Image (spheres, grey):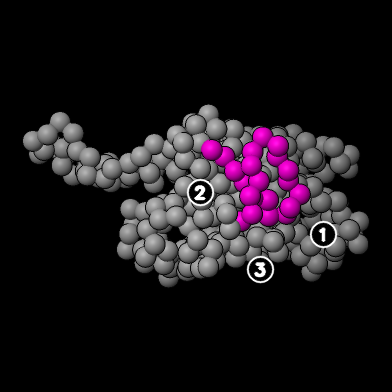
Amino acid sequence: MKIVLLDAQTLGDSDLSPFEKLGDFTSYPLTSKEQRLLHIGDGDVIITNKVVIDEEIIKANPQLKLICIAATGMNNVDLIAAEKAGVMVKNVSGYSTESVAQSTFSMLFQLIHQSRYYDNYIQSKGWCNSPSFTHISRPFGEIKGKRWGIIGMGEIGRRVAEIAAVFGCEVCYFSASGKNNQQAYQQLDLTTLLSTSDIITIHAPLNENTHNLIDQQALKQLKEGAVVINMGRGGIINEAAMAEAVDQLGIYHGTDVLEVEPMIADHPYLSVQAKERLVITPHTAWASQEARKKLVQMVADNIESANL
């Protein structure tokens, strides 16, 4: 069995030996659109994180038996074309729950504690030159007693809810699909959640129900000083509108995802003036060492269970 990993760089320094044990294994750091056919070669199994496997590629590789997606989302594979060609497609889920939940709180605390400002104050020797034992120019509050609204109450959303409750937050949620009904937390319509929550975190997939869900009109409903964190998918938030809201409405925003990744050079977030109210990470929330190890093993298990 010949196994090809098309974008190993997206898995960082993960141990890929579980794949090596299963067959003749080849990996490429990245694969461009033009390199797909060359890199796939005569592979029976291909592993992709973000490389698009469309109908053209599937038809050009009649030897292909299995496409493994090293992620939960399956939008980068033409599932209809794969089914017609008799090619199995398997994804993985649940590997990053703890990593994303932890990253959500890490980003929240960066925003509300203004830790970047205080670190810069120390690094510039501001404290060394201070006549006082303390420096609290950037005040911060406690999250206990605050209303925490969650958009997307799947596995990650539920884990965030559990932790937020431990901190003493009043947790509520909005189900974009309308299918979730969590008895432990109050379900609200979107308008009520936006207008009454102090902290809003997004853990939803991108689909027809969530695309541009948080637009200019929605942002105007937020409380002044509200924190909005997107750990779901880019495209759920209108990024131009959010950049304006951070500067003009006093909103605090953190995001790990953007509609176009990598980030474009003229992205509106890069022009935000109130930089202390904005934190961006480059799609890393899913990628703790533990989560990536689990991901690799789950993909290997998918290959083994295919019985090729």
- Name which residue type carries label 3: Glu
Q: Is residue 182 left or right of residue 111?
A: right
Q: Report x, y in % for residue 10.
A: 58, 49
Q: Name the side, left or right, on which 197 lies relative to 124.
A: right
Image position, residue 77 (x, y; %): 75, 59
Disc nearest the viewer among 3 and 1? 1
Judge whether residue 21 can be spotted in this image. Answer: yes
Q: Nearer the viewer, residue 298 or 97?
A: 97
Asked whether 70 or 246 is in front, the reply is: 246
Which quarter of the picture shows residue 131?
top left
User: How far apart are the two marked residues, 2 and 3, measured between alpha carbons?
Assistant: 46 Å
> Mark 1 packing: few (<14 Cα in 10 Å), some, or many (20+)?
some
* Left or right of residue 154: residue 165: left
Tell me the element at label 3. Answer: helix
Residue at the disc numbered 1 = 79
For marks 2 and 3 on the same chain, the one whose residue lies earlier in the sequence: 3
Quickly name the residue at label 3: 34
Residue type at the position of mark 2: Ser
Q: Which mark is residue 129?
A: none
Placement of the C terminus among the 4 image quadrants: top right
Q: CA distance from mark 3 to mark 1?
A: 21 Å
Q: CA distance from mark 1 to mark 2?
A: 38 Å
| Type of amino acid under label 1 | Leu
Find disc 2 in the rendering and name its residue: 197
175 magenta-colored: yes
Q: Is residue 68 left or right of residue 212?
A: right
